[in-house]
Amino acid sequence: MRYIGRRLLYAVFVIWAAYTITWLLLYALPGDPIGIMLAASNDTTPETRAALEAEYGLDKPPILQYFTLLFSLVTGDFGTSIQYGRPVVDVLFGALPHTVLLGLAALVVTVVVGFSIAILANTVRSPWLRNVLFTLPPAFLSFPIFLTGLLLIQIFAFQLHLLPAVGNEGLASIVLPAVTAGVPASAAVAQVTSKALSEYLRSPQAAYLRARGLGPGRILVGHALRNAIIPAVTILGMEFGGILAGAVITETVFSRQGLGRVLQAGVLSQDIPVVMGVVLFSAVLFVISNLVVDLVYPWLDPRIRKA
């Protein structure tokens, strides 16, 4: 219980830190959200500006704005979007399913690609092929996400006409965005898992199992992979948060709906309630993914339960 309590306190601290840093950055940015809002209308009188500033709480001192918004978020009141004129919660919940679906699909790509490279790199007998497999993770990381997405669109949408280039229509539309976000994330999984497999397969325990007559397949699946799961799960939790954080790039390249597109529009229009809401949602999703990893640890490694 003490372990779970520490993890929960850490989760609360991360969410508060994300909220505070984002608020400070938004407050430091030059810009005038009310001016942007009034620019779209013909009513730019001082009375209208004063009324809008009072409505969104922008007429209060900064420190009071900070605590007022923090208290509202804690109580579940995310305010009203300056850009959309609707409750922020409605805007976020309308976009959230698209981003979560993209994140889960990218996570599947991450697991499949990362574990496949790690297993093949430790089982193939050809030295040159093994070297090629070991160079793939650094190559994945060297390509910017937007460049990977544009390259996939060019090949699979425009040249081969196999998959749609943009949009949210149908499961086929999520394949290219999931590969774009998932392949770079698989690099860390492949490296960590490959190292863990290599260390185990060269260990005295593996030699003992071979001496007892166990085949390479049983040693790999029954023992080496189990030993490699713990570091891989750690990386997966962090990579899932990274995939969600990078959704703004992936969703923009593929013109998909989601929190990333909402965040992009919110930053451009200085829509503070929406930006704060997206950041808080993203922080909560990141914390939940890491909290799940932390809670799975004791189940995977009994030594943690005893600590």
Image (cartoon, grey):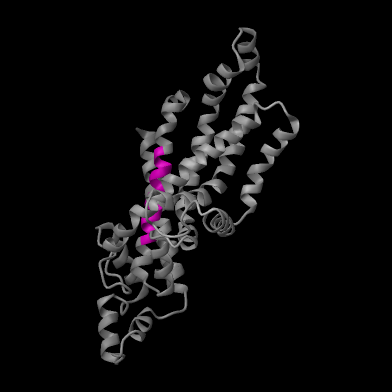
In the rendered image, which quarter is residue 56 located in? Answer: bottom left
Q: Nearer the viewer, residue 250 or 91?
A: 250
Q: Is residue 144 above or below residue 171?
A: below
Q: Is residue 128 left or right of residue 20?
A: right
99 sits left or right of 226 in the view: left
The secondary structure that most of the magenta stretch takes on is helix
185 vs 306, left or right, is right
Specify whether 243 is left or right of 45. right
Name the spot of residue 11 as percent of width and height, x first. Answer: 39, 47
- Quadrant the N terminus occupies: top left
* Residue positioned 37% across, 36% down in the render: 4
Above or below residue 10? Residue 254 is below
Name the residue rendered at 37%, 74% in the picture. Answer: 62
The span picked out in magenta is: 278-292
Percent x, y of residue 124: 67, 27
Please state which of residues 234 and 70 is positioned toward the viewer in this rendering.
234
* Residue at the limit of the structure toward the top, as seen here: 212
Above or below residue 195? Residue 54 is below
Asked if the stretch drawn in magenta spans residue 92, the answer is: no
Within the magenta stretch, is there residue 285?
yes
